[in-house]
Image (cartoon, rainbow, N blue to C red):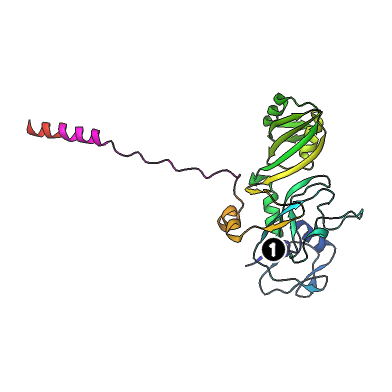
Amino acid sequence: MAERIAKRLARAGLCSRREAERWIAEGRVAVNGKTLTGPAVTVGPNDHITVDGRPIPAAEPTRLWRYHKPRGLVTTARDPQGRPTVFDNLPPELPRVVAIGRLDINSEGLLLLTNDGELARRLELPSNAWTRRYRVRVHGHVDPGRLEALAEGITIDGVAYGPIRARLDRQQGDNAWLTMALTEGKNREVRRVCEHLGWPVNRLIRVAFGPFQLGSLEPGAVEEIPARVLQDQLGQGGQAGKGNGPAKRRPSKKRPDKKRQDGDRSRADRRRKA
């Protein structure tokens, strides 16, 4: 199947499409021996593609893993400041993977990993409406009414954040535990919203991303999601589903009322006899 070169590199698990476009601009990608100067190139199955002079691998079947990210790791392949990264701490037997979304260095919890950069790009799109759910510990005395108001969205310093479902789980002295669920996942959204309300975050744990749960996965552990489960959740054609709620039931057809049918037959018989 013919496809754009950036998409082909992403499907090979080498990078995201955005990274592929940067590689092309840097002159690192060649097709059939010719170095590319722009991403507007379509390639087919018989084209010879290289990155830094090395042939790219064949596109592998899409795979997805759950990873319990600990605090203290950055979600990037290379950190300019030399801080430890998620990818430095993955098991060596894993193939080359990319993260779906990010968790900042002080956040922990569920991070999805995939060998398919194109899938990562799709699942990160807000249009998929996949809910990200967090357990959040904040400093301060929380007003439940202000939490409920977040369902209408909020604008902070000119940045509009969409609806957030939030509730107070418990107040413990000067700290409180919240559960927050959102679909946009803008950069540091939970922290910025809570700090704007006067409740700085001192712990943040992502417990769900769409239909995938952190569950009892230990910090630092990685677990592959079975291919059948992945296919069920993404749907036919590999498209991410809308939201993560149950499928809607079709309205059931009403069964005929037997007594009413019998009565109708009796009236019709009497009319014929008359």
**In this rendering, would 5 be left or right of 202?**
left
Residue found 61% across the figure and 59% down from its top: 226
Residue found 78% across the figure and 26% down from its top: 141
- Against 236, residue 160 (above or below) is above
Callout count: 1
Task: Provide the residue designation for mark 1.
Answer: 11
- Against 188, residue 228 (above or below) is below
Residue 150 drawn at (x, y percent): 70, 30
- Against 191, residue 62 (above or below) is below
Q: Is residue 80 magenta?
A: no
For residue 202, say whether it is visible.
yes
Pick the residue in front: 127 or 189: 189
Quadrant (top left, top right, bottom left, bottom right) of the C terminus: top left
The residue type indicated by label 1 comes to Arg
The rendered magenta stretch, by its main secondary structure, is classed as loop
For residue 157, say whether it is visible.
no
**Label 1: few (<14), some (14–19) or many (≥20) C-alpha neighbours in 10 Å:** many
**In this rendering, would 39 be left or right of 231?**
right
- Against 33, residue 82 (above or below) is above
Residue 148 drawn at (x, y percent): 68, 28
Q: Is residue 259 magenta?
A: yes
What's drawn in magenta, residue-wise? 242-266
